[in-house]
Image (cartoon, rainbow, N blue to C red):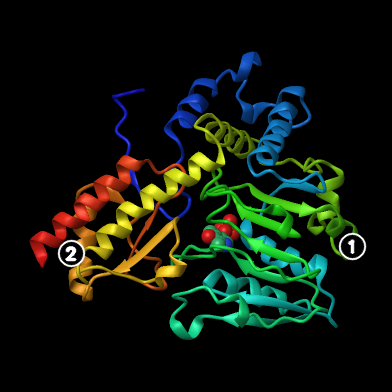
Amino acid sequence: MNQLVQRAYNFNAGPSALPLAVLEKAQQELIDFRGTGMSIMELSHRSAAYEEVHNQAIALLKELLSIPEDYEVLFLQGGASLQFSMIPMNFLTPEQKAGYIMTGSWSEKAFSEAKLFGNPYHVASTKDSQYRGIPQFDELQYNATDAYVHLTSNNTIYGTQWKEFPQIGDIPLIADMSSDILSKPIDVSKFALIYAGAQKNLGPSGVTVVIIRKDMIEKANSSIPTMFKYSTHSKNNSLYNTPPTFGIYMLGEVLNWVKGIGGIYEISKRNEEKAKLIYNAIDQSHGFYSGHAELGSRSLMNITFRLKDEELEKKFLEEAKNEGFIGVNGHRSVGGCRASTYNAVPYETCKAFSDFMLQFQNKNE
Ligand SMILES: *Cc1c(COP(=O)(O)O)cnc(C)c1O
């Protein structure tokens, strides 16, 4: 569209790339939002113009993810991190147990918060293998009386992802999908609650999406502060207090963009093709690059790999930076390299990076 714009090769893990078309539309609408004479940020959250944006974003998410009728979509604040606390606050009592499937740092953080409210325990953990994989279904040891079981669908830091989700009977299954929501089709009906900070696949930071089955709202603890109750936000269509209006507008536009390019199946296909470029560069390198994740657990969103020693890794990261690749450093807690190939990262960016990987290998092998 605008050839003059120099866009970075953005592999940031979050906040991360947004579709150029969405940014351009936001820019166009910034000063006079649809004839209101003001920006979306200056509108009342009770105005008809804002409400339309808000309700359309909810409707579009329901459509794109085929969310069943008995679920609600909420827009909250506090990030996915606040959900780590809100979930046990709403669903766990001091006598009750909740199962946590431990697949990385985010699961650990979620688990720590649950300890403040009840008795969480590990259903399974892949920590002993440096979180290289996702547990097999037959390793999952949970109790029929658990308040819920929690998992992290995509492990942003370690680069692993659930390919299929377990069926755990009547126990509510709760998932942190912050880093792979809307990247592929999912069967929402398997979950009692899904949550995601928007800043990886859905929009800017500041909005957290919660998809919650209605019976969960009804059975939650009622003796917690108003803002922490899912029921407060549900009763008020996420307009109990002032929502992050600009973030929700951007989220709606990102959803529009996904719909416009063909929806969830098209996005999913593109994500597979993008990740394949980089995984191929790893797999065809004869060990020059080594992937962190086990083959069956590889993430299509965060591709983590190492080089043979830290010195070479440093050189790789430096050259990558000089070539314009942003955000390729691994998370500060684990080191190595990571390319985050979220929905809005273009194929061309991944192609340029896989070409760079090959060139770097040829020069340094
Ligand atoms: C980024 C991330 C979080 C933290 O999200 P915030 O919105 O910053 O609180 C939690 N879980 C996963 C899987 C993430 O990728």
Q: Specify the amino acid type for callout 2.
A: Lys
Q: Left or right: where does residue 145 sit relative to residue 189?
A: right
Quick one: which residue is furthest to the left in this view?
363
Position in image of residue 65 (x %, y %):
65, 44
Position in image of residue 274 (x %, y %):
37, 48
Q: How many marks?
A: 2
Determine whether the residue tagged by mark 1 lies in a helix, strand or loop. helix
Q: Specify the amino acid type for callout 1.
A: Lys
Q: Residue at x 52, y 80 (%)?
A: 126
Residue that mark 2 sits on: 315
Q: Is residue 68 visible?
A: yes
The mark lying in front, picked from 2 and 1, is 1
Task: Please tell me whether residue 228 is drawn above or below residue 54 in the rendered image.
Answer: below
Q: Residue at x 29, y 24 (%)?
A: 3
Position of the N terminus by quadrant: top left
Task: Please tell me whether residue 327 is drawn above or below residue 244 in the rendered image.
Answer: below
Task: Please tell me whether residue 225 is drawn above or below residue 136 in the rendered image.
Answer: above
Asked where in the image residue 98 lies, by quadrant, the reply is bottom right
Q: Nearer the viewer, residue 124 or 249?
A: 124
Position of the C terminus by quadrant: bottom left
Q: Left or right: where does residue 93 sit relative to residue 274?
A: right
Position in image of residue 130 (x %, y %):
44, 80
Q: Which mark is residue 219?
A: 1
Q: Left or right: where does residue 170 sit relative to residue 129?
A: right
Position in image of residue 163 (x %, y %):
53, 62
Determine whether the residue tagged by mark 2 lies in a helix, strand or loop. helix
Q: Left or right: where does residue 235 sit relative to residue 76?
A: right
Look at the numbered disc 2 and say if its residue's Cβ is closer than 8 Å to ligand 1: no
Q: Given contact means CB atoms under 8 Å apart, are the residues at marks 2 and 1 in contact?
A: no
Asked where in the image residue 46 lies, by quadrant, the reply is top right
- Assess disc 2: are there few (<14), some (14-19) or many (≥20) residues with their C-alpha within 10 Å of its C-alpha: few
